[in-house]
Image (cartoon, helix red, strand yellow):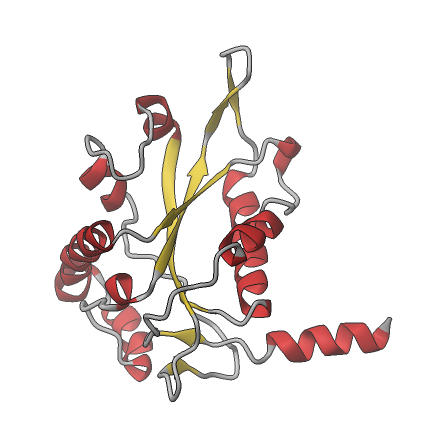
C-alpha cells in the first residue's frame, strides 16, 4: 500500500502547467476515458453539478482565444492589483493566450447552481464549487496519467465566455443551462511538446 502511494505521488510530482502546446491530435477515446474518471469525483448530495464541453473546432477555439484575450487585456492593464501582477511576473504570463488556439482540444468546465430533474423540476446543488473543483482535479490527474499536458486557465472574470456565446450555437447550451450555470475554467489539452515551457516551482501551483 505504501509503495503504491509513493508511486502515485512521484507520478503526480512530474506534472507541470504547460503553456507551449503541441498541435498533434489526441488519440480517439483518450479524452472520453479521462472525462469518465472526472465524473466519479465525490460531490454534494451526488447531484454532479458539472458540465464538461470538449472543443476541437479551430474556428471556435479562435473565437474563444479572442474573447479571452480581450478579458485578459483588461485584467493586466487595469483590474489586477500590483501584488497579483508581481506574483505572476516570474511566470512571464501576459494577455496573449495562443495556447487556447494551438492546443488540439480545450475542455470548458461549467459549474451548475441548479439541475433539472428528469421530471422537469429544478433542484438546487450543494457545495457546487467544491464538487467541480474536485472533479477538475480528477480530470487533470487522469490527463496527466494518460501522458497529456494541461493548463488550468481561469481568466477573471470567467463569465465572459457565457456572455460572449450566450446566443451562439458554439456549445449548444439551452437557455435554462445558461441561467443555471457559471464558467469554472478552460483547460487546453495536448500531447507534450519537446522542450516545452512549463511552470516549475516548489509549490507546483498554477
Q: At 29% across and 57% down in the image, what residue appears?
A: 155
- Picture quadrant of residue 98: bottom left
Observer able to see residue 134:
no
Q: Position of residue 29 (x, y in %)?
A: 52, 54
Residue drawn 65% across and 46% down? 40
Residue under the point 19% across and 51% down: 59
Where residue 47 appears, x then y in whole percent?
59, 31
Q: Quadrant of residue 76?
A: bottom left
At 12% from the left edge and 65% from the top edge, which residue is drawn? 77
How far across and down, in percent of the image, does residue 185 sit?
38, 52
- Relative depth, front residue between 50 and 125: 50
Q: Is residue 18 above or below residue 176?
A: below
Q: Quadrant of residue 199?
A: bottom left
Q: Which part of the image, by quadrant, shows the C terminus?
A: bottom left
Whether residue 187 is visible: yes
| Image location of residue 81, percent across then percent down | 24, 65
Q: Is residue 35 left or right of residue 150?
A: right
Quarter of the picture containing the N terminus is bottom right
Please give left or right for residue 193 compared with residue 115 in the image: left
In the picture, measured across the screen, residue 2 lies left or right of residue 47, that is right
Amino acid at each position: 500500500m505504501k509503495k503504491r502511494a509513493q508511486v502515485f505521488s512521484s507520478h503526480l510530482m512530474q506534472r507541470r502547467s504547460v503553456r507551449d502546446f503541441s498541435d498533434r491530435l489526441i488519440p480517439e477515446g483518450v479524452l472520453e476515458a479521462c472525462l469518465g474518471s472526472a465524473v466519479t469525483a465525490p460531490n454534494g448530495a451526488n447531484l454532479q453539478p458539472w458540465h464538461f464541453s470538449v472543443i476541437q473546432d479551430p474556428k471556435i477555439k479562435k473565437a474563444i482565444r479572442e474573447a479571452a484575450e480581450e478579458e485578459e487585456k483588461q485584467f493586466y492593464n487595469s483590474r489586477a492589483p500590483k501584488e497579483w501582477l508581481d506574483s505572476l511576473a516570474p511566470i512571464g504570463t501576459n494577455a496573449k493566450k495562443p495556447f487556447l488556439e494551438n492546443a488540439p482540444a480545450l475542455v470548458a468546465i461549467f459549474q451548475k447552481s441548479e439541475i433539472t430533474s428528469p421530471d422537469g423540476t429544478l433542484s438546487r446543488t450543494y457545495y457546487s464549487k467544491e464538487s467541480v473543483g474536485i472533479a477538475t482535479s480528477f480530470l487533470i490527474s487522469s490527463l496527466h496519467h494518460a501522458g497529456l499536458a494541461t493548463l488550468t486557465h481561469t481568466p477573471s472574470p470567467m463569465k465572459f465566455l457565457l456572455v460572449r456565446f450566450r446566443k451562439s450555437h458554439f456549445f449548444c447550451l439551452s437557455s435554462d443551462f445558461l441561467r443555471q450555470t457559471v464558467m469554472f475554467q478552460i483547460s487546453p489539452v495536448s500531447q507534450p511538446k519537446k522542450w516545452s515551457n512549463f511552470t516549475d516551482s516548489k509549490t507546483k501551483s498554477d
